Image (spheres, grey):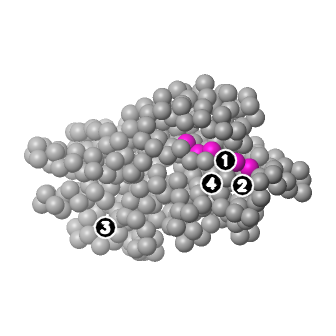
């Protein structure tokens, strides 16, 4: 489903009690997110703010953005329902544990859109990067780089989160195709940069040999751990985070691949919620954004990586700051994060 580009934001000009020509009032949208301090999630929130500002039908965005678990997110969701929002866009901590609140929201006529990961509540919409394919593309590339055999470090996200589960399914699918690849170390990073970096430092200190690293988006700090410890570089797979993309372009001796995983899917979730509120629901309740792999081991891949470099972004932000056909904000607006 494609969307028409909106005009400049008029959110600030909407007076309380305003009614549009078709009879509906400006919308209030609630946002729920459970991970702070992670560049991908911060870009997701900024994309939500920027897209809400670009939507002339949106009057207010209520954001619950904190480090918490499924129980904490359940509390946040119930608070958003109590606030009377028209739609909720969430990055779910668990696919099933939030259903009591999501069912209540849907029963109350509130549109529910899950981004980045799925939920099982009937009637909820899901707009996500294809997480299984994300992992499969990167793992297959890594295993091929190793000639189909060797030992790899497998650095995951958060146990129980559906995005991590989907990625594990993709990783295991690739692993099944390469029976001579062995996972020598598996760890959950919590999608936290400092934690993932320390975990790599700790494993390097064991002296256990390995041939490659697959990361669930904690990538530039893994390169830092190798460089700072003096360990020889091995092939590394990460996401299209600005810092990692720069390392792929500039770090001598680094062989690696970035798999696209735009945090701007959060902005697309806001756009989808508005479409649904305006009667434009998609035919399917699940909409997937397919990833692409950029490798620095080919001339074509190097050219793509060079074109994606963006020194204006935080190193932990994906360079894919928009999703064509969905998001309407500019680069300046998402970076400003002012919506």
Eyeballing the image, is 302 above or below 326? below
Q: Is residue 194 left or right of residue 217?
A: left
Which residue shows up at 31% across the image and 51% down it? 193
Q: Nearer the viewer, mark 2 or mark 3?
A: 2
Which residue in the protein does label 3 denote?
Answer: 247
Disc 4 from disc 3: Cα separation = 28 Å
Of the image marks 1 and 3, the number of the one nearer the N terminus: 1
Mark 2 and mark 1: Cα distance apart in space: 7 Å
The image's mark for residue 29 is 1
Q: Judging from the image, what secondary structure is the residue with disc 4 in?
A: helix
Instruction: Decide: few, some or many residues near mark 3? Use Cα within 10 Å; few <14, some 14-19, many ≥20.
Output: many
Q: Give the total number of marks visible in the rendering.
A: 4
* Foreground tag (1 vs 4): 1
Q: CA distance from mark 1 to mark 4?
A: 13 Å
Q: Nearer the viewer, mark 4 or mark 3?
A: 4
Q: Position of residue 195 (x, y in %)?
A: 27, 46
Write the residue at 61% across / 24% down: 100
Identify which residue, 332 or 179, lies in the foreground.
332
Q: Which mark is residue 58?
A: 2
- Check if mark 2's residue and mark 3's residue have beta carbons within 8 Å: no
Packing grade of label 1 (10 A; few <14, some 14-19, many >=20) is: many
Alpha carbon distance from label 4 to label 2? 14 Å
Magenta residues? 27-32
SS assignment at label 2: strand
The residue under the point 11% across, 47% down is 205
User: What main secondary structure does the magenta stretch of the protein show?
Assistant: strand
Query: Is 96 drawn above or below residue 296 in the view shown?
Result: above
């Amino acid at each position: 489903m494609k969307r028409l580009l909106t005009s400049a934001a008029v959110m600030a000009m909407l007076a309380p009690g305003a009614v549009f020509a078709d009879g509906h009032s400006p919308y209030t949208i609630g946002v729920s997110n459970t991970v702070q301090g992670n560049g991908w999630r911060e870009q997701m929130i900024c994309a939500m703010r920027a897209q809400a500002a670009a939507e002339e039908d949106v009057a207010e965005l209520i954001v619950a953005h904190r480090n918490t678990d499924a129980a904490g997110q359940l509390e946040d969701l119930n608070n958003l329902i109590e606030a009377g929002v028209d739609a909720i866009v969430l990055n779910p901590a668990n696919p099933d544990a939030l259903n009591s609140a999501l069912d209540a929201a849907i029963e109350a006529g509130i549109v529910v859109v899950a981004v980045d990961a799925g939920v099982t509540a009937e009637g909820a919409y899901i707009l996500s990067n294809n997480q299984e394919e994300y992992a499969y593309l990167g793992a297959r590339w890594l295993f091929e780089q190793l000639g189909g055999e060797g030992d790899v470090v497998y650095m995951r996200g958060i146990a129980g989160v559906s995005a991590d589960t989907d990625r594990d399914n993709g990783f295991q699918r690739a692993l099944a195709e390469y029976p001579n690849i062995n996972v020598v170390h598996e760890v959950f990073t919590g999608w936290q940069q400092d934690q993932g970096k320390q975990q790599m430092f700790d494993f390097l200190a064991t002296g256990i040999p390995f041939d490659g690293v697959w990361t669930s988006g904690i990538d530039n700090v893994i390169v830092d751990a190798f460089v700072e410890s003096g360990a020889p570089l091995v092939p590394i797979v990460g996401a299209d985070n600005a810092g990692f993309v720069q390392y792929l372009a500039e770090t001598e001796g680094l062989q690696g691949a970035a798999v696209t995983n735009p945090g701007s899917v959060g902005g697309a979730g806001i756009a989808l919620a508005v479409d649904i509120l305006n009667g434009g629901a998609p035919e399917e309740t699940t909409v997937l954004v397919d990833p692409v792999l950029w490798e620095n081991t080919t001339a074509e891949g190097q050219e793509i990586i060079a074109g994606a470099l963006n020194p204006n972004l935080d190193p932990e932000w994906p360079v894919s700051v928009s999703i064509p056909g969905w998001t309407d904000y500019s680069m300046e607006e998402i970076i400003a994060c002012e919506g």
